[in-house]
Image (spheres, rainbow, N blue to C red):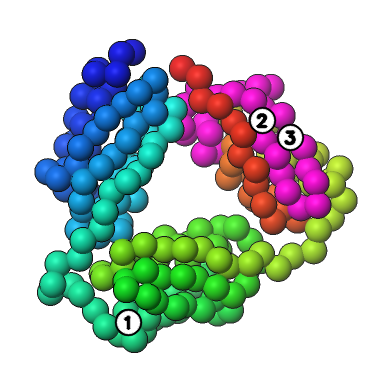
Amino acid sequence: MNNETLELNVADELFWDPKVDNEAIAVSAIDGTVTLRGTVGSFRQKREARNAAERVFGVVSVDNQLDVRILNEHRREEADLRGDVLRALKLDSLVPTTVDVTVKDGFVTLTGTAYWQYEREEAEFIAGNVIGVTGVENDIYLDIATPYASDVKHSIKKALARNAKLDAKNIDVETVDGTAILTGRVSSWAEHDAAVAAAWAAPGVTTVNDRISILY
């Protein structure tokens, strides 16, 4: 697929997604790498634009350079925004109470501890949905005991083999001190995300080093 066709397909997908205001988004593509430039009205729209681009066949990576510009009526004082984010996190049962929040110029930093990666991801997702947030930095630390590396590797490979979305024979797994290193190739972003999620779900994993290539 040539660059122009890929650019048009990504632009069409952005237009098609009702969660994205595509009017101020410019798309460029070089050899499968798509760059998004322009402005959106919320951090959630920036995130959804990236998700939309990754759905398009032929996209191997997305450089999301979109700026978030909050309308005046949605701008919040730092203390008020922090309170809103904390309340949103508290209402979500998947987010541990050990998570804390700081805010600077609309940018939210999440700190504290969690036991599972899905808890970190849930906190980041919820914080990014709050009106007035321009960005999210996830500094939540995974506070878990690390089992034997061989046990972690075995559990991840079994999870990959069970997943109907994946061709597990094309993915290699190594583990070092709680870090799961994934290499190999997949044929779509959906496969890529499924493999990374499977690795994060293994007990004892504190970091996933994602080296998976997407080859169409």
Q: Which of marks 1 and 3 is nearer the N terminus?
A: 1
Q: Looking at the image, do the residues carrying marks 3 and 2 touch, with CB atoms under 8 Å apart?
A: no
Q: How crowded is mark 3: few (under 14 residues within 10 Å), some or many (20 or more)?
A: some
Most distant residue in the bottom direction: 79
Q: In this view, does 210 lie above or below 40?
A: above
Q: Distance between the residues labelled 1 and 2?
A: 41 Å
Q: Seen in the image, is 206 located left or right of residue 66?
A: right
Q: Is residue 105 above or below residue 136?
A: below
Q: Does residue 48 appear in this view?
A: no
The residue at the point 30 percent across, 59 percent down is 43
Q: How crowded is mark 2: few (under 14 residues within 10 Å), some or many (20 or more)?
A: some
Q: Mark 3 points at which residue?
A: 173
Q: Mark 2 points at which residue?
A: 183
Q: Does residue 69 appear in this view?
A: yes
The residue at the point 51 percent across, 58 percent down is 121
Q: Helix, strand or loop at disc 2?
A: strand
Q: Name the residue under label 1.
A: 78
The residue at the point 21 percent across, 24 percent down is 8
The tag on residue 136 is none
Residue extent of the magenta highlight: 167-194
Q: Seen in the image, is 213 located left or right of residue 189?
A: right
Q: Helix, strand or loop at disc 3?
A: strand
Disc number lying in front (1 or 3): 1
The image position of residue 206, as x and y in percent, is 69, 56
